[in-house]
Amino acid sequence: MTKGQLEARISEAVSAFEINYMGRGPKQIKTTIVQDLIIIRLKGFLSQVEQKLAESSQGVELLKRVRTSLFESAGEYFEKTIKDVVDVTIVSLHSDVSTRTGEKIIIITLDENLESTFLK
């Protein structure tokens, strides 16, 4: 499997996770493997209600708190989803949402340099 193929498989798995666990998938998703990091950028994943909620500062705070809580509560399921694709131990997960752009960034730290496996 090539690096691009693995990145595509991770994107597909994350998109399925978003649909099945969070209730809605992104319009676009891009995964990039850089050394021991997997960086996933999701665009267009906020619902219309969430976009409306994000028009006020209180709404932004509430939306971020709810999205963070949902993602953290699904941490084990998300890790298993990724591990099933990459078969590498996950050290940590980081996620943030931009209510201004409607983007979500997920960064996964691994216990080994996954990118180096494609350089051989």
Image (cartoon, rainbow, N blue to C red):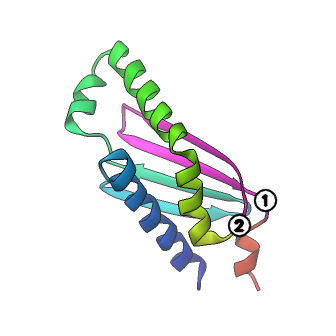
Amino acid identity at mark 2 = Val
Q: Residue at x 30, y 47 (%)?
A: 23
Q: Pointers 2 and 1 in contact (CB under 8 A)? A: yes
Splitting the image into 4 quarters, where does residue 50 fall?
top left
Splitting the image into 4 quarters, where does residue 28 fall?
bottom left
Which residue, as the protein is rendered here, is positioned at the far top?
Answer: 58
The residue singled out by tag 1 in the image is: 111
Left or right for 95, reference 20: right
Secondary structure at badge 2 equals loop
- Looking at the image, residue 82 lies above or below residue 25: below
Amino acid identity at mark 1 = Asp
Give x and y (percent) for residue 67. Answer: 43, 34
Q: Residue at x 36, y 14 (%)?
A: 57
Left or right for 97, reference 37: left
Give x and y (percent) for residue 22. Answer: 37, 45
Asked if the magenta segment contains residue 11, the reply would be no
Give x and y (percent) for residue 35. Answer: 73, 63
Dominant secondary structure of the magenta stretch? strand
Quarter of the image where the C terminus is located: bottom right
Residue 19: numbered disc? none
Asked if the magenta segment contains residue 106, the reply would be yes
Q: Earlier in the sequence, mark 2 or mark 1?
A: 2
Left or right for 66, reference 25: right
Secondary structure at badge 1 equals loop
Q: Residue at x 79, y 64 (%)?
A: 112
The residue singled out by tag 2 in the image is: 88
Quarter of the image where the N terminus is located: bottom right
Label 2 to label 1: alpha-carbon separation: 7 Å
> Magenta residues, as a range?
88-112
